[in-house]
Image (cartoon, rainbow, N blue to C red):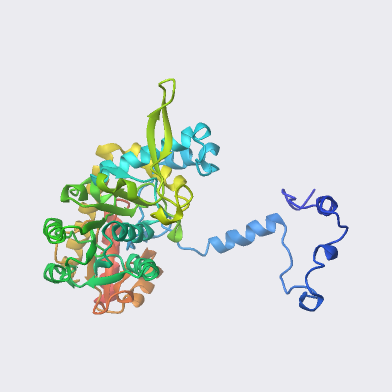
Amino acid sequence: MSEFRYLPLTEKDRHDMLDVIGINSDEALFADVPEKIRFKGELNLESKLSEPELIRFFSALAKKNASTTEYASFLGAGVYDHYIPSVVDSVISRGEFYTAYTPYQAEVSQGELQAIFEFQTLICELTGMEAANSSMYDGSTALAEAALLSNGVTRNKKVIVSESVHPEYREVLATYAHGRGLDVVTVPMKDGATDLEALEAATDDATSCVIVQYPNFFGQIEPMNEIEQIVHRVKRAHLIVSSNPLSLGLLTPPGRFKADIVIGDCQPLGISESFGGPHCGYFAVAKKLIRKVPGRLVGETVDEKGQRGYVLTLQAREQHIRREKATSNICSNQALNALASSVAMTAFGKKGIRELAKQNIQKAHYAAEQFQKSGIKIVTNQAFFNEFVIDCGRPVSEVNHELFAQGIIGGYDLSKSYEGYTNKMLVAVTEMRSKNEIDQFVKALGGISVG
């Protein structure tokens, strides 16, 4: 019996390939590489493992990870522990989806194209926007691409972003902006939300777009009506909103606030945390911007027999049009993760998504109330979705270490990203947390920070 189930390169395979190219040895294959720079001897590598040994080795490594199946997690900050219906894995594991590649040929990709079309439709319904693309890599790159789209349309170089937008999203934006020579202006916060006076002072005729997060990084609900009025008093400026899609099950969708572009990460809807990724970004726009959308759009049409069919349409990337006319060089999309989100949203239905969002709000507010009763200060001052800020009274890294010893994954240490937030923890409470888990968390944290 062989040590391995798969033998991708036997000695016969090697000799056959050498025969095809007309040589008889490996040495002849590398004849053009100067002798003096060739490596001699054996590489300092560990001895090979058989397949069973390899499986045991990586299984042991995997067991060192702390997962949300064993620990109660109150860590959010962009990646959350949410309920994923079992039907999601069942559908995305099907071979026709799991191994599907880019649907360049519509005639052989109708299933994949229809799945993407359904994703676009669901995103539009959630966000209140008129068009959505087939997905982006994640929320951060979607945000950066939105800024580039705005720059391309307005020709203005000034990008205004609120300090309450996810700090990692702002880092990705800065990287993209550097290459395009854009001027990124960060507007400060006031009481955990965008400082409206500072935003109004910063917004002028040179502004391309204003980017806010709703709910913001601290979980608070930004005053979107006021922000929209400030942004759109500048004739050409765009309002870009980064939104947790699950929150839109209850919150007024950004489209109702006249947002021009709405982006975000679909991870809360059917995609596992996966220790940080991969996830799936969504990108939705008002109709006036549909021809500038990066990535792909799938359209519904009919064939010559009048039968419904799906095609890639309004292509705006360099593979389809002249390079200088391209709006983006994004060459793929997260089709499998987009499908996972579509299946989850379909399984939940309209009422189910509203119920999930409602449970997030109720459980997060219950947790906040219990913290207040236990004497732990709540820093969040405004309405919030499923995240809020507490003052631990001690370094959060120390607190989280002690919580972990009790089987609890604590919240995000805000001092990592924001000055003035020493000892402040961003706590996330999703529908997955039971009353007992919340009570245990409050009790444990109270004993650590107060005791």
Question: Residue 378: x and y, percent?
Answer: 18, 68
Q: Is residue 155 shown left or right of residue 304?
A: left
Question: Residue 327: x and y, percent?
Answer: 38, 54
Question: Residue 213: x and y, percent?
Answer: 24, 60
Which quadrant of the view contains residue 130? top left
Does residue 221 sit above or below 203 in this rendering?
above
| Front one among 60 and 244 | 244
Which quadrant of the view contains residue 61? bottom right
Question: Residue 132: x and y, percent?
Answer: 32, 45
Q: Residue at x 20, y 66 (%)?
A: 371
| Front one among 294 and 256 | 294
Q: Is residue 271 visible?
A: yes
Does residue 191 sit above or below 216 in this rendering?
below
Residue closest to the far right: 24
Q: Is residue 47 shown left or right of residue 135?
A: right
Q: Residue at x 34, y 50 (%)?
A: 293
Q: Is residue 23 shown left or right of residue 250?
A: right
